[in-house]
Amino acid sequence: MYEYTDKIISTMNKRFIRIMDRLKRRLASIDEISALLTESEQTIAELDYITRNMLLKAAKKAYKDNGGRLDTIDEMWLNAYLNGLSPVTKYSYANEVDRKRSRFFETLAASDKDPKELKPALRLWSHMAGEYALEVTDLAVLQAYMENGVEKVRWITEMDGRECSECASRDDMIYLIHNVPPKPHWGCRCILVPEQ
Ligand SMILES: [Zn+2]
């Protein structure tokens, strides 16, 4: 279910690292606060751009692979999800990006452009992007199911020895497709399959 999404996540992470490395090299030559502001805003804009593009790719592929035949999955579809409140992260991606944008600049300015400060920011961004890649994949799969008339789905828990008790208790449960409970935690890799 998540093979392609995992590839997307790994590609995103590589690109995030490149962007941060480039910023690291530039930091030394930035001496005005206004230039630092521009630079940090551009960095977040680039991370956001890549993330949105890659999330859309993951969602489109998940939709097609699960029988989606329409053009339902597009930028508007993605934006609607990213502007709304995620039941898993408990925030809206779009708002969080705004928060990260100001926080990133403040951190760099307060730490006197210390490149070490880039690492935690990079980690948090990757963590967020990875979670949303799973979420939009799930959403696209459900969309494809619904368009194909699926009414019920079976929850299959990823039993990898690390599953939480909530996920374990849902294994094999059947839900109406419009009534599937949200994933209980970040990084949940449980899947939903059509139930005949
Ligand atoms: Zn789970």
Image: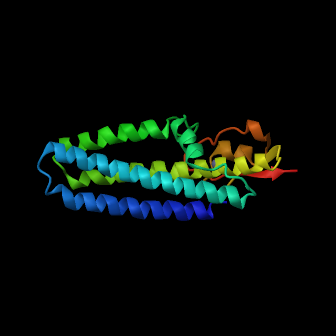
Q: Nearer the viewer, residue 42 or 20?
A: 42
Q: Residue at x 42, y 49 (%)?
A: 48
Residue 7 sits above or below residue 78 on the image: below
Q: Residue at x 26, y 57 (%)?
A: 23
Res. 154 visible in picture: no
Q: Is residue 90 left or right of residue 167?
A: left
Q: Position of residue 139 (x, y in %)?
A: 65, 47
Q: Is residue 194 left or right of residue 79?
A: right
Q: Residue at x 31, y 51 (%)?
A: 43
Residue 194 sits above or below residue 82 on the image: below
Res. 21 visible in picture: yes
Asked which quadrant contains residue 170, the reply is: top right
Q: Is residue 144 left or right of residue 95?
A: right
Task: Give the colouring mode of the picture.
Answer: rainbow
Q: Nearer the viewer, residue 75 or 134?
A: 75
Residue ranking furthest to the right: 196
Q: Position of residue 82 (x, y in %)?
A: 52, 41
Which image quarter is the N terminus in? bottom right
Q: Nearer the viewer, residue 181 or 83?
A: 83
Q: Residue at x 19, y 55 (%)?
A: 27
Q: Position of residue 166 (x, y in %)?
A: 66, 42
Q: Position of residue 80 (x, y in %)?
A: 57, 39
In the rendered picture of this protein, how many numbered marks are placed on residues? Answer: 0
Residue ranking furthest to the left: 31
Q: Is residue 63 left or right of residue 34?
A: right
Residue ranking furthest to the front: 71
